[in-house]
Image (cartoon, grey):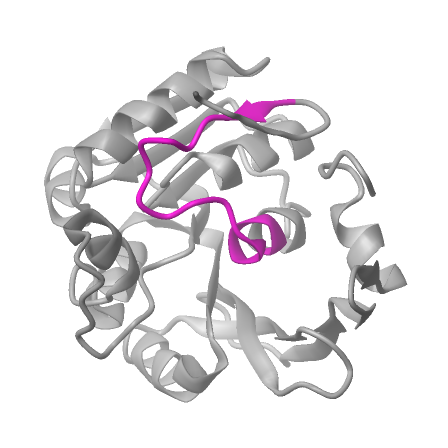
């Protein structure tokens, strides 16, 4: 039985996706800066399409493109896009980042990515899930090379990564003159270690605005900051 994940304004089916909806994607979709009123958005590695759908809800961009290399995930993303209230603005390409770069001349005002994040090779026995999780399928240096070629001069690039990869990611970005502008570190609860980093990059070198988000005060008791960030999306917030 196909049980969808329902949000306030759209529904996600994920039975064909190796990587299911998780906190990372929702955080990035809610946190990403849209103050530049982007007219064109690109999601690199769309999975279910969750981040593109969240941004379609949040802003009026005419073009929201996504690319997904896994065939099953691509087909499911298309299904989720077409069933949404913003189907006329959402489009998914079945392509790798390299293939997409070769085909597209457009520049995007906003690029987002929840990239594969395990640098070590691990095997779960599910090759699609392993591909979706391991950054050997999209190394950070190739991700930033692609972004630097697709981002408009005043554009924004936002991504979510494991905190332990933060230093390496900042170094890779700097090689292509992409500078951090906002950095938010995420903890599960007050006493836990920082688990994730959300980073916003620009081509302009500015002072970095850094802060911290704690998700839960205690088990299933969410912080006010987390509720305020996600309440437009989660049904029970």
Q: Is residue 167 above or below residue 100?
A: below
Residue 91 image point, x, y percent: 36, 22
In the rendered structure, the answer to whether residue 174 lies left or right of residue 158 reads: left
Main SS category, magenta section: loop
Image quadrant in which the C terminus is located:
top right
Q: Is residue 146 above or below residue 41?
A: below
Question: To which quarter of the image does residue 223 belong?
Answer: bottom right
The residue drawn where x is 55% and y is 28% is 61
The residue drawn where x is 18% and y is 32% is 71
Residue 65 image point, x, y percent: 37, 31
Question: To which quarter of the image does residue 183 belong?
Answer: bottom right
Q: Is residue 215 magenta?
A: no
Q: Is residue 22 magenta?
A: yes
Residue 102 image point, x, y percent: 10, 41
Residue 170 image point, x, y percent: 41, 81
Please identify the residue farthest to the front as the structure is shown.
Answer: 1
The residue drawn where x is 52% and y is 74% is 180
In the rendered structure, the answer to whether residue 23 lies left or right of residue 159 reads: right
In the rendered structure, the answer to whether residue 176 lies left or right of residue 9 reads: left
Please identify the residue farthest to the right as the structure is shown.
Answer: 224
Image quadrant in which the N terminus is located:
top left
Q: Which residues are magenta?
A: 10-27
Q: Is residue 89 above or below residue 126?
A: above
Q: Nearer the viewer, residue 49 or 234?
A: 234
């Amino acid at each position: 039985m196909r049980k969808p994940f329902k949000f306030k304004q759209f529904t996600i089916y994920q039975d064909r996706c190796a990587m299911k909806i998780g906190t990372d994607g929702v955080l990035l979709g809610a946190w990403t800066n849209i103050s530049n009123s982007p007219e064109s958005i690109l999601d690199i590695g769309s999975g279910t399409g969750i981040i593109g759908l969240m941004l379609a809800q949040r802003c009026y961009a005419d073009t929201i493109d996504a690319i997904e290399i896994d065939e099953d995930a691509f087909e499911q993303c298309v299904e989720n896009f077409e069933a949404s209230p913003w189907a006329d603005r959402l489009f998914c390409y079945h392509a790798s980042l390299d293939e997409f770069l070769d085909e597209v001349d457009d520049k995007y005002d906003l690029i987002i990515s929840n990239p594969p994040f395990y640098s070590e090779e691990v095997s779960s026995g599910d090759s699609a899930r392993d591909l979706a999780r391991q950054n050997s399928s999209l190394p950070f240096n190739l991700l930033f090379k692609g972004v630097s070629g697709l981002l408009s001069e005043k554009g924004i690039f936002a991504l979510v990564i494991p905190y332990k990869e933060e230093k390496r990611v900042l170094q890779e970005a700097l090689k292509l003159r992409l500078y951090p502008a906002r950095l938010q570190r995420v903890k599960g609860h007050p006493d836990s270690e920082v688990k994730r980093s959300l980073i916003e990059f620009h081509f302009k070198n500015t002072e970095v605005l850094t802060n911290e988000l704690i998700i839960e005060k205690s088990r299933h008791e969410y912080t006010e900051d987390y509720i305020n960030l996600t309440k437009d999306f989660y049904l029970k917030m």
